[in-house]
Amino acid sequence: MRKALTLILVWLGILGLAGCGQGAVFYGSSWAVVNKASDAGPISTLTIPTTGTGNLIVVGLMFNGGTYAIGVSDDAGNTYVSADAKAYAGVDSTEIWYAVNSKPGATVVTPAFANSTTHVEITVWEVSGLSTSAPDVSSASSGNVTLSNTPGPAVVTAHAGDFIVSILFALDTTFSGISTGNDFTDDFTTNGNGWAHITSNSVPAGTYQASWVTSTPQGEYCASTVAFRLAQ
């Protein structure tokens, strides 16, 4: 009898149903980028690979006009929310929006703005394995581009394995790629700007900051970073 009870407790411990007097909390083992797309210009929409079910959709926006985004939508009826990572440099801005628990079949993402813009840049990441709750943390910054290394805003995550997106809109300059040794992958250099996500899906909680190699001429920038938690 004692042996049988011991075996039961061992299995419960493995399954996370018993131990240390605390209730079990399950988290997804890791995230994975399913699809991504990017475009820029006098555009109003972005065509993306057809979305799947139950994923996170992250939308990075860069735009001019001294305005702000009032919403994001797609043709599958997903609900998008601002991640509260809004940055400004003159009349130019960056924002990040997201939709959780995606509906399948979306092929076009459309941002809406309070006032008219003449230039919009849109990048979308679809990611599996992420939480249906609000982001872990978000951050925004603006400043002046430096010649060899321009960092985006740092975030201090509270949870291991976060998916982190960072975007940087540089005025009057271009990026040649992510800085050597940086923790981020440069997904796109659309219109010479930075669109990156954390490379590893198993990073510990801590401070993370994307950084790009920049070239002359140098000017202002605005940037946004958001970290999303693993599924619970």
Image: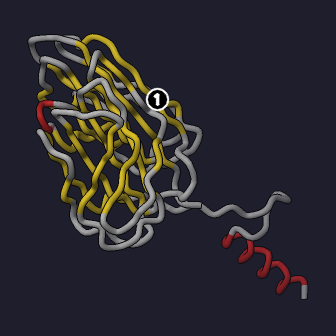
Residue at figure coordinates x 37%, y 58% from the top left = 127
From the viewer's side, name the closer residue of 111 and 152: 111
Quarter of the image holding residue 192?
A: top left
Looking at the rendered image, the quarter that the C terminus falls into is bottom right
Quadrant for residue 133, please give it. bottom right
Question: Residue 123 location in percent, x, y?
Answer: 25, 46
On screen, residue 127 above or below 218: below
214 lies left or right of 155: left
Could you tell me the amino acid type at mark 1? Ser
Position of residue 33 in the picture relative to residue 171 (left or right): right
Residue 224 percent location from the top left of the image: 37, 31
Residue 5 percent location from the top left of the image: 85, 82
Residue drawn 15% across the image and 11% down it: 218
Q: Nearer the viewer, residue 39 or 42?
A: 42
Whether residue 30 appears in this view of the structure is no
In the image, 82: left or right of 106? Answer: right
x, y (%) of residue 163?
42, 47
Residue 144 shows in the view: yes
Instruction: Give the answer, above or below, for where 25 lies relative to 172.
Output: below
Residue projecting furthest to the right: 1
Q: Nearer the viewer, residue 15 or 162?
A: 162
- Label 1: few (<14), some (14–19) or many (≥20) C-alpha neighbours in 10 Å: many
Q: SS at mark 1?
A: strand
Which residue carries the number 1 mark?
A: 139
